[in-house]
Image (cartoon, rainbow, N blue to C red):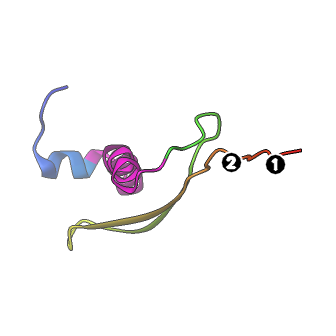
Amino acid sequence: PGHAPKSMVEKVVDPRELYEVAADEIVRSTFEKAVKELGLEPDGGVRPSVELKELDKDKGVAEYTAKVPLPAKIELAEY
């Protein structure tokens, strides 16, 4: 992809679409790292649920909550 001046892009691109793409990129780039840091082993067959709490480019803030499905732990009792 090429590069364009910010002012030109802002005239052509819908700000909501830009925020959506930015939010998606932020989640993609930070989710895996957070899962590894917390030592979680998500269930690969179920997608996590993500809720965007805040995205403010002026403050430089992005906050989201992710619900990560974990596989069931089953322990068999002795008979």
Which residue is at the far front? Answer: 79
Q: Which residues are magenta?
A: 12-40
Q: Is residue 12 left or right of residue 14?
A: left
Dot 2: element: loop
Above or below: residue 58 compared with residue 49? below
Mark 2: which amino acid? Lys
Spatial separation of the CA atoms under disc 2 and disc 1: 13 Å
Magenta stretch: dominant secondary structure: helix
Which mark is drawn over residue 73?
Answer: 2
Mark 1 crowdedness (10 Å alpha carbons): few <14, some 14-19, many ≥20? few
Mark 1: which amino acid? Ala
* 28 part of magenta stretch: yes
What is the quadrant of the N terminus in the image?
top left
Which residue is found at the position 70% from the left and 47% from the top? 72
Which mark is drawn over residue 17?
Answer: none
Which residue is found at the position 89% from the left and 44% from the top? 79
Which mark is drawn over residue 77?
Answer: 1
- Image coordinates for residue 16, horizontal then vertical, percent: 41, 56
Which residue is found at the position 32% from the left and 46% from the top? 13
Name which quarter of the figure residue 55 lies in: bottom left
Above or below: residue 75 compared with residue 1? below
- Image coordinates for residue 21, horizontal then vertical, percent: 37, 46
Q: Is residue 22 left or right of residue 65?
A: left
- Image coordinates for residue 56, horizontal then vertical, percent: 29, 69
Dot 1: element: loop
